[in-house]
Image (cartoon, grey):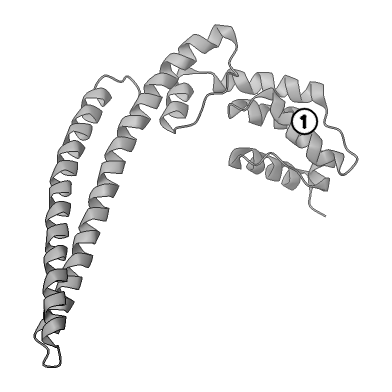
Amino acid sequence: MRSKHTILASIIALALSGCATMNQQECMVSDWRTVGFEDGSLGRPPETIGNYRQACAKHGVSPDLESYRSGHAEGVQSFCQPVKGFNYGRSGATYRGVCPAELEYGFIAAYNEGRQLHQLEAAVRSADAQITQRYRALENIKAEITNKEAALITDGTSAAERITLLSETKELARQHGLIEAEIVELQRDRTLHAQALGEYRNTLAYEF
């Protein structure tokens, strides 16, 4: 049987991974104040305990609601700090309204800054991914053209087949040109996104 320390560590790991569920042993030995604190410190709403209640009901165990809420309130105090709001927004996570009124204004302001940074960084990554995909497409087209050109000069290729191969090669060359034009446009967009990202980073007070 696992020790209480090991089981508690497992519960914390589950909280960090975003999986709000428990097995029988975890339900029986959980420190519900600690579980609540972990959920609160990760920005999860207090209603998360409903997931534990459902999982533990299968084993005849009911979570300690008061202990969980008490721990959750402490965890929220840790979570609802501007620097964490910024990092939470930058991660792309959705804020779920857990901060008390006295902390929410500063948290949301920082969260929105982080969220904006996330979106600008995502735009650059998206442009990079699209450019990479287009270059791969060009390589595939080049390979197809090479194969068809080889077939054109093969002794066993009939006149009719050569006509077809020439037509297909012409179409591939047309597609190649279109993709090259797309790459130029994407690279232009990528430059603009990167410029916007750099300018925005210079306005931020947070380290990243």
Residue 92: image quadrant is: top left
Q: Residue at x 26, y 19 (%)?
A: 203
- Give the side of residue 6 with respect to residue 190, left or right: right
Q: Is residue 188 visible?
A: yes
Residue with the most extreme front position: 160
Q: Which residue is drawn at 83% across and 27% down?
A: 64
- Give the side of residue 133 with respect to residue 66, left or right: left
Q: Nearer the viewer, residue 144 or 158?
A: 158
Residue with the most extreme top position: 102
Q: In which quarter of the image is the N terminus?
A: bottom right
Residue 4 at x, y = what percent?
Answer: 79, 44
Residue with the most extreme right position: 60
Q: Nearer the viewer, residue 123 or 157?
A: 157
Q: Quadrant of the C terminus?
A: top left
Residue 59 at x, y = what percent?
Answer: 88, 44
Q: Is residue 62 above or below residue 151?
A: above
Q: Which of 79 and 21 is in front in this view?
A: 21
Q: Nearer the viewer, residue 4 or 11?
A: 11
Type of the residue with mark 1: Trp
Residue 125 at x, y = what percent?
Answer: 30, 42
- Give the side of residue 120 with respect to residue 75, left or right: left
Q: Residue tagged by mark 1? A: 32
Q: Which residue is drawn at 56% across and 23% down?
A: 79
Q: Residue at x 16, y 76 (%)?
A: 164
Residue 39: image quadrant is: top right
Residue 33 at x, y = what percent?
Answer: 75, 27
